[in-house]
Amino acid sequence: MRILLTNDDGIHATGLAVLEDIAAQLSDDVWVVAPELEQSGQARAVTLSAPVRVREAGPKRFAVSGTPSDCVLLGVHDILHDKKPDLVLSGVNRGQNIAEDTSQSGTVAGAVEAMHLGVPGIALSQTKGMRKGSPVPWETAREHGAAIIRMLLDNPWPKDVIMNVNFPDRLPDEVAGIEITRQGFRDESIIHTDKRTDLRGNDYYWIGFGGKLSNPAEGTDLRAIYDGKISITPLHIDLTHHAFRDALAVGLAGGLNDKLNS
């Protein structure tokens, strides 16, 4: 099995090294195509207004001056042009990608780009910050990652779906189980801006996320992570709200065409 690895934290990230350890348990044909620099929060951005450069960083290892989507696109179309990968793994992200995070995540986008190109994609993220003062428990993703991926590969998913895996902020032997979840949504926004002033008197801003917990419903990725479980969520990029679409169609039945023809 040929596996392509990418991430959004950059080619030197600890989480990518963890992902390489995981992938090595699954295959001896593992390739890395990752951003030269951190690309967190880039979502599905593709670089269209500047050249994208590729640097060979070692055997089967390439650094790209672009986004995670750029990396997967170039990996599949150009770097691995002789044989398309059988699987794309994106991560392991430093921090969770759950709830509304998923639409901004470059980690999730790497898996989505794979799906778009006809390759199964799995995004993997390691939760942090829920045990105040404790380091990121990378050993949790490292110890459980290969088994989770094998389990998923034994249960193939639809071609328009990617799998989003989040490991809890717990040590490996403290994980409370595995839960198949749905995407949640926080009851309060945790993104914030911090206005500062540089030494020349000019204002600038840092944008970041706070650590306030919400009160998520059972069955969501948020609740699973809060409960110390590994969350596995099947995601797709159909953003249509189908229930309201149907209600809207009924509510406006006839009216739209009457308006158009008036």
Image (cartoon, rainbow, N blue to C red):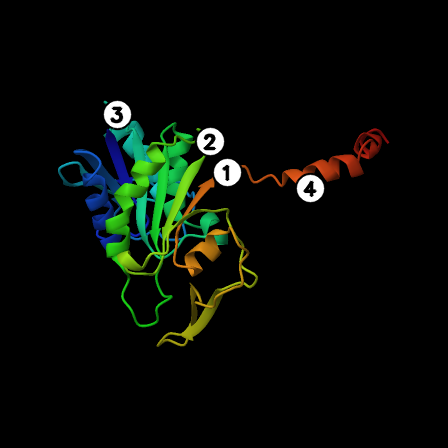
Mark closer to the chain start, 3 or 1: 3
Q: Do the CB atoms of the residues marked 1 and 4 lie less than 8 Å apart? A: no
Give the class, few, some or many, for how many residues have Cα within 10 Å of label 2's Cα (few <14, many ≥20). Answer: some
**Place of residue 175 in the rendered image (x, y in percent of width and height, measured from the top left):** 33, 56
| Percent position of residue 118, x then y | 39, 27
Q: Is residue 73 above or below residue 13?
A: above
Which one is earlier in the sequence, the residue at label 2 or at label 3?
3
Question: What residue is disc 3 on?
Answer: 81
Q: Residue at x 30, y 37 (%)?
A: 150
Which one is closest to the eye, mark 3 or mark 1?
A: 1
Say whether residue 210 is left or right of residue 77. Answer: right
- Residue bearing mark 4: 244
Say if mark 3 contacts mark 1, CB within 8 Å.
no
Q: Which mark is residue 202?
A: none
Q: Secondary structure at mark 4?
A: helix
Residue occupying the point 34% across, 39% down: 70
Q: CA distance from mark 1 to mark 2?
A: 8 Å
What's under tag 1, amino acid-wise? Ile
Q: Mark 1 — residue? A: 237
Q: Earlier in the sequence, mark 3 or mark 4?
A: 3
Which of labels 2 and 3 is toward the front? 2
Task: Determine whether label 1 and label 2 are within 8 Å by CB.
Answer: yes
Q: Identify the secondary structure beneath mark 1.
A: loop
Residue at the far top in the pictured view: 82
Q: Which residue is denoted by mark 2 in the rendering?
A: 160
Q: CA distance from mark 2 to mark 3?
A: 22 Å
User: Could you tell me residue 243's position as x and y percent?
Assistant: 67, 40
Q: Amino acid at mark 4?
A: Phe
Locate residue 20: give its quadrant.
top left
**Label 2 amino acid?**
Asp
